[in-house]
């Protein structure tokens, strides 16, 4: 105790907790083993964040642990802070996977996560002189006490080499020779649900290792250390880093290897486990569901075919039926540049057997098209897997899965009518919607204990297990005392947050100002730039009319940009430059402040959502598939200022139009403009002097010493005709923003709207989403 560091104490506490969990973990595994169908959620990303504080809460141990540690003179919060965020994801997609694991465990569904144990998570973001700087996230440096290495369950994954074909009467037998073997070693992480004697599910992450650990001793002895270790490091590179591209394709061979690596390891282990329990392989799909989160695990289609044919001896048609019935796929994006495709040559050489199977799937698919849709060239171009020298992964996924779902009603409609228009003709029954959800236990109960406490006092604790119960809050809409509690919780959160910002950045925030918040990955379609232009316009007006009647506002931003995404990084720099200018200008800084918080991750997210008054959800309509940040804000009583995009449409339907502030073009209008090529950003710019002024300020030395830094943004708006309709939506955005801040003057009305948002947020719990997946897609 005298020698121990906070890290030692943290680790010890986790080990103690794991000891306790093991009983429930073993019980859960046993219970799942015999009874029911297993679900495997395959995802390249799991953004699980920190576990200790959340698990203590779920287990009802926070109080006793606080007390026990207190007797030892240790502060629990200090140990909680020691944990590293498991940042194994980019943003929404990875966090969704984490929320789904949470809800599957809570709902006692035998749902297992399958992913990659990246040695380096998503980079850590630092801001230096206003610029984003990326620092590697070596989160495993001191070990990760939650994981359990299972070397006895390791699997060999084969790359490259060539195929030798042998004929056994009418059967072709493929021998994969001279391949490069990679050992996939599983590490299991417990997923602990909320409750009395909760189920403990498993997230299995695979790490890549050399099969033969005896490195090249001869070279080593001759002093050629690098050569001796080169094979080993080349192999370990497979699970080295998480690719930081959020929506655009990484073309690296390594990425292709990563995808096959965790697919082959995961499916190999699943088939092995299934057979060990003695089930006939013909019944596989009755006992196993494999879900693929976006197309990154789409190689499940050919890999399961390979296992069933080459290893289990099934004929093509039988293997195909099992494969399609086992697999289901979620589409996450409509951006054409984000639809994965791999060069055929690369796939052929890296994964020769997998490529052959894909070729055969494609051949049979084309054959079907010729017989059922003769002469329909457009349909063919829209749906075949192999085209223009590429393997189109989304097409492979749709053909090889029995279910294809979008992540919000609007998104699913656009998926059917645009991206997969052709497939919607061929397989209309495959398509369905499953609107995303978030863990209300993590993002409300755990992240916002003061609000959660008031809710429980008012309507009892049932909402924790059944978020639909939050509806009961509607009865309190005119209860002045309860509205006061809401306002008190928000105020206290803001005071604490302002204290933390002051301690970290030395910046003074006014907790009684309106907190207007946009936190999410930086991307052109998310339109952080629109928000910036709005703030610049507000600044201009304040400078002209210092007595402008307005309520003080604090604009908060956070989020990472992909390291190679110059435009997005420039927007980050712009925000920091604007923050400098505004925060240091005594003429305005009593009324407006701008703050950029570095390194947005789950831990920071949990601190930010609870302090928001306004939730900025301002993507170009039709571009954001669902969004989940919008749901987390809503649960915490923020009021949405947004476009009718993704799940924000459903938020509006739930709360009613008097409790949300909607502006801008609708999805169909955006699509129509695009189809007709009818938008001209120059006209918008010329027609609106306030708009023209802020756009000009990007390049006219309004920002001193910035030279041509923001020219790229100016050009995107005017030279490149404003692909994301920022200028088009500017007017209705600033008007609607003025309306929403106007409402804040009357606290009673404001908190009544906030209450309506909290009360209607139950449907956006991932419990609801998982129940829908379980019933309609996985049949568990
Ligand atoms: C919820 C969440 C996101 C997704 O936010 P959107 O606003 O839906 O893009 C991204 N990152 C983290 C850390 C999150 O918690």
Image (tube, helix red, strand yellow):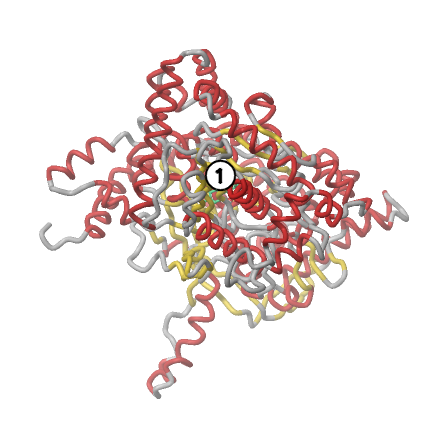
Residue 109 pos. (x, y %): 46, 32
Q: From this viewpoint, which residue is outermost toward the right? A: 375
Structural crowding at the residue carrying mark 1, measured as other residues with C-alpha within 10 Å and reported as few (<14), some (14–19) or many (≥20):
few
Q: Is residue 297 left or right of residue 665?
A: left
Residue occupying image coordinates x 90% and y 48%: 375
Camera sees residue 107: no
Q: Quadrant of residue 210?
A: bottom left
Q: 141 and 18: which one is in front?
A: 141
Q: Is residue 28 left or right of residue 167?
A: left
In the displayed structure, would residue 739 be above or below residue 574?
Answer: above
Q: 712 and 419: which one is in front?
A: 712
Q: From this viewpoint, which residue is outermost toward the left? A: 2
Residue 609 pos. (x, y %): 43, 36
Q: From this viewpoint, which residue is outermost toward the bottom? A: 222
Camera sees residue 213: yes
Mark 1 — residue? 546
Residue 161 pos. (x, y %): 59, 70
In the displayed structure, would residue 3 be above or below residue 761?
Answer: below
In the displayed structure, would residue 437 be above or below residue 225?
Answer: above
């Amino acid at each position: 105790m005298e020698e121990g560091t906070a890290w030692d104490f943290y680790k010890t506490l986790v080990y103690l907790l794991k000891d306790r969990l093991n009983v429930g973990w073993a019980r859960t595994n046993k219970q799942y083993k015999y009874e029911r169908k297993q679900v495997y959620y395959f995802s390249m990303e799991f953004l699980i964040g920190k576990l200790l504080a959340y698990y203590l809460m779920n287990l009802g141990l926070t109080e006793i642990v606080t007390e026990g540690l207190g007797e030892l003179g240790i502060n629990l919060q200090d140990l909680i802070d020691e944990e590293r965020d498991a940042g194994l994801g980019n943003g929404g997609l990875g966090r969704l996977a984490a929320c789904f694991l949470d809800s599957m465990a809570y709902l006692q569904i035998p749902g297992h996560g399958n992913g990659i144990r990246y040695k380096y998570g998503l980079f850590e973001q630092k801001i230096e002189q206003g610029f984003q700087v990326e620092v590697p996230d070596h989160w495993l440096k001191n070990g990760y006490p939650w994981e359990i290495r299972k070397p006895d369950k390791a699997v060999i994954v084969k790359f490259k080499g060539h195929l030798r074909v042998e004929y056994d009467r009418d059967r072709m037998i493929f021998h994969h020779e001279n391949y490069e073997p990679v050992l996939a070693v599983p590490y299991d992480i417990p997923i602990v649900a909320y409750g009395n004697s909760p189920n403990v599910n498993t997230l299995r992450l695979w790490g890549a290792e050399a099969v033969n650990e005896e490195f090249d001793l001869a070279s080593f002895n001759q002093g050629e250390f690098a050569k001796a270790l080169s094979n080993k490091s080349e192999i370990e590179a497979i699970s080295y880093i998480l690719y930081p591209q959020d929506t655009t394709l990484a073309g690296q061979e390594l990425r292709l290897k990563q995808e096959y690596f965790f697919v082959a390891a995961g499916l190999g282990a699943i088939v092995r486990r299934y057979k060990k329990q003695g089930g006939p392989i013909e019944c596989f799909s009755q006992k196993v569901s494999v879900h693929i989160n976006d197309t990154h695990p789409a190689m499940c289609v050919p890999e399961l075919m390979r296992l069933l044919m080459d290893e289990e001896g099934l004929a093509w048609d039988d293997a195909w039926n099992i494969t399609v019935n086992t697999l289901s796929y979620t589409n996450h994006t409509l951006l054409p540049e984000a639809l994965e495709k791999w060069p055929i040559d690369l796939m052929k050489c890296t994964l020769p057997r997998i490529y052959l199977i894909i070729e055969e799937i494609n051949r049979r698919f084309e054959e079907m098209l010729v017989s059922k849709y003769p002469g329909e060239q457009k349909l063919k171009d829209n749906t075949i897997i192999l085209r223009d020298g590429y393997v189109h992964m989304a097409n492979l996924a749709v053909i090889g899965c029995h279910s294809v779902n979008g992540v919000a009603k609007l998104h699913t409609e656009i998926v059917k009518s645009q991206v997969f228009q052709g497939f919607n003709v061929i397989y209309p029954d495959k398509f369905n919607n499953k609107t995303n959800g978030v863990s209300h236990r993590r993002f409300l109960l755990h992240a916002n204990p003061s609000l959660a406490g008031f809710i429980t006092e008012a309507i009892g604790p049932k909402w924790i297990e059944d978020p639909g119960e939050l509806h009961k809050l509607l009865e309190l809409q005119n209860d002045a005392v309860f509205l006061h509690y809401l306002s008190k919780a928000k105020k206290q959160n803001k005071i604490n947050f302002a204290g933390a910002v002051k301690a970290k950045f030395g910046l003074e925030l006014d907790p009684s100002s309106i907190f207007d918040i946009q936190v999410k990955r930086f991307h052109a379609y998310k339109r952080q730039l629109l928000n910036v232009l709005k703030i610049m316009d507000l600044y201009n007006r304040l400078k002209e009319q210092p007595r402008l009647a307005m309520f003080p506002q604090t604009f908060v931003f956070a989020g990472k940009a992909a390291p190679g995404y110059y435009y997005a990084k420039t927007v980050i720099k712009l925000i920091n430059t604007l923050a400098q200018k505004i925060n240091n200008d005594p003429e305005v800084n009593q009324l407006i402040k701008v703050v950029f918080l570095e390194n947005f991750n789950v831990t920071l997210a949990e601190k930010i959502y609870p302090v928001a008054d306004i939730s900025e959800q301002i993507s170009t309509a039709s571009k954001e598939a669902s969004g989940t940040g919008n749901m987390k804000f809503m649960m915490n009583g923020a009021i949405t200022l947004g476009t009718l995009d993704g799940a924000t449409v459903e938020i509006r339907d739930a709360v009613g139009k008097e409790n949300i502030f909607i502006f801008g073009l609708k999805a169909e209008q955006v699509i129509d403009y695009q189809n007709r090529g009818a938008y001209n950003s120059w006209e918008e710019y010329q027609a609106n002097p306030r708009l023209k002024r802020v756009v000009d300020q990007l390049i006219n030395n309004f920002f001193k010493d910035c030279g041509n830094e923001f020219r790229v943004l100016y050009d995107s708006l005017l030279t490149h005709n404003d692909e994301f309709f920022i200028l088009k939506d500017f007017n209705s955005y600033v008007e609607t923003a003025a309306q929403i801040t106007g409402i804040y003057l009357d606290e009673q009305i404001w908190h009544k709207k906030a209450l309506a948002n909290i009360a209607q947020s139950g449907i956006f719990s991932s419990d609801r989403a998982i129940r829908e997946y379980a019933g309609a897609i996985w049949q568990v």
